[in-house]
Image (spheres, rainbow, N blue to C red):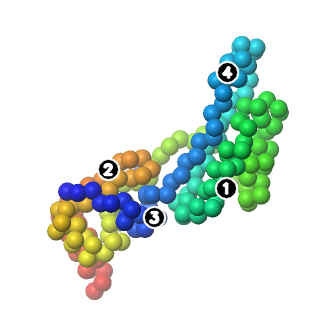
Amino acid sequence: MAAIALGSLSVAFSDVIVDSLVVERARGESVAAAGSLQSLSWGASAAGGLLIQVLPKAARDEALVEKLESRVAALAGFTPLLQAGKTLPQIFEQLLGDMGLEILPETQLVRFHCGCSFDRVMGALKILGQDELRDMIEKDHGAEATCHFCNEVYRANSDQLEGLIQELQAESV
Ligand SMILES: [Zn+2]
């Protein structure tokens, strides 16, 4: 079994998994600044961070990604803004206000969850078509794909790829 070059799969996977997740972490607060604040108050004064996730389709828009990166880089850090009395909506407005910012009424705790699954990988492989699948069976005796969101590795053997070919044949009748 050989790993499929993910570059060549990125188109097929684009609506499912892959290649285009861009997570930009806002610049960290300076440790010294945080320490001095803590010694003054012995409590949390303000701490914040920013996680921007570009959805797969938008991530292909390099100008957009660059714009977001430069905006975040220009941000002087979250703690000073919060200390200055800015609210989160004000900070977001300052950062992204001219980019169609819409703040949803509900805020929620977030956690990382990847929706990938073997079935979805098989669905993405199927999109490659019969010729490509046959090629994988002959050359690699299977296929391997890594989810770029969570790094889960999925492997399909020749029988499973053959199953996809049969599904495609059945659908084309
Ligand atoms: Zn995943």
Labels 1 and 4: the sequence-earlier one: 4
Specify whether tag 4 is near ligand 1 (CB below 8 Å).
no
For the point 71% across and 35% down, which residue is it? 78
Q: Residue 173 location, x and y as percent?
A: 28, 86
Q: CA distance from mark 1 to mark 2?
A: 32 Å
Identify the mark at residue 67; answer none if there is no mark.
Answer: 1
Per the rendering, the mark at residue 32 is 4
Answer few, some or many: residues within 10 Å of disc 2's Cα (few below 14, many 20 plus, some between 14 and 19): some
Q: Which mark is residue 14?
A: 3
* Pointer 3 or 4: first along the chain: 3
**Residue occupied by mark 2:** 153
Report the side of 81 relative to 152 (left or right). right
**Circle nearer the viewer, 1 or 3:** 1
Disc nearer the start of the sequence (1/3): 3
Per the image, label 3 sits on a secondary structure element best described as: loop
Do callouts 3 and 2 mark residues in contact (Cβ within 8 Å)? no
Q: Amino acid at mark 2?
A: Val
